[in-house]
Amino acid sequence: MTAHPPRQRLYLITPLVDDAASFAPELERALGSGDVAAVLLRLAQGGERSLIERVKTIGAAVQSRDIALVVDGHPEIVARAGADGAHLTGITAFAAALAALKPDRIAGAGGLRSRHDAMLAAETGADYVMFGEPGRDGRRPGFEETQERLTWWAELLEIPCVAYVASKDEFAPLAHTGADFLALGEWIWSAPGGAADAIAAAAATVGGSVT
């Protein structure tokens, strides 16, 4: 055991981005308010060229701060768009994306509905696993189940785990699981006082505020 456990960091999830040029200034303000390790970019539907241009625009705001830019899905455009990696939902999608991402880019795994799936993702090359996020149907695992899974993973495995935080009230209990990263869901963008204030408060809670 160590006297001082590793510092937890924030993982910021964007809303669905259609107009990247309009969203980028708000994102930059948010990133300046706390210790954000990575941004998960969720893209609204569009043609391949449009998607790549949106990733590049957001990448200019994110990567200049030495923050990783991870695209939600779309592993086929990650390299061309200059992103740092992709987040895949479900073990099947994760396994199918590995050839496009490894060894140079981040391969994140979410939507893992069992311990077996999580272990399989880790064994096949996941750079992190995420627990608690909603599926494509909008449904989430039970909160107590998510807490249990995060605690189990954080105590036993070295590959980082990410806790999906769906509301302000979930932040503290999920931080207590020992998760390496706390992913702030879409609620952060409509938080009272704005996203920057909410991120600053979250960062201060885990010791990663910006001074």
Image (spheres, rainbow, N blue to C red):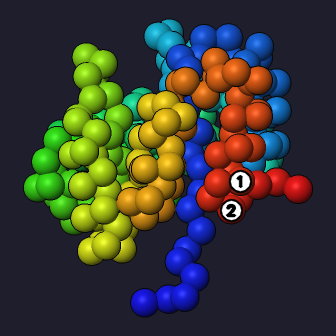
Residue 139 visible in the displayed image: yes
Front in this rendered view, residue 45 or 1: 1
The residue that mark 2 highlights is 207
Of residues 76 and 63, which is closer to you in this image? 63
Instruction: Classify mark 2: residues with Cα within 10 Å, few (<14), some (14-19) or many (20+).
Output: some
Secondary element under disc 2, as helix, strand or loop, is loop
Q: Residue at x 76, y 33 (%)?
A: 196
Whole-angstrom CA distance, mark 1 to mark 2, is: 5 Å
Q: Amino acid at mark 2?
A: Gly
Whether 6 is drawn above or below 78: the answer is below
Q: Looking at the picture, tell me which residue is in the foreground, 153 or 85.
A: 153
Name the residue carrying label 1: 204
Residue under the image location 68 percent in, 62 percent down? 207
Residue 80 percent across, percent down from the top left: 56, 36
Q: Amino acid at mark 1?
A: Ala
What is the tally of numbered marks visible in this picture? 2
Q: Position of residue 127 (x, y in %)?
A: 40, 59
Q: Residue at x 35, y 67 (%)?
A: 154
Whether the residues at callouts 1 and 2 have beta carbons within 8 Å, the answer is yes
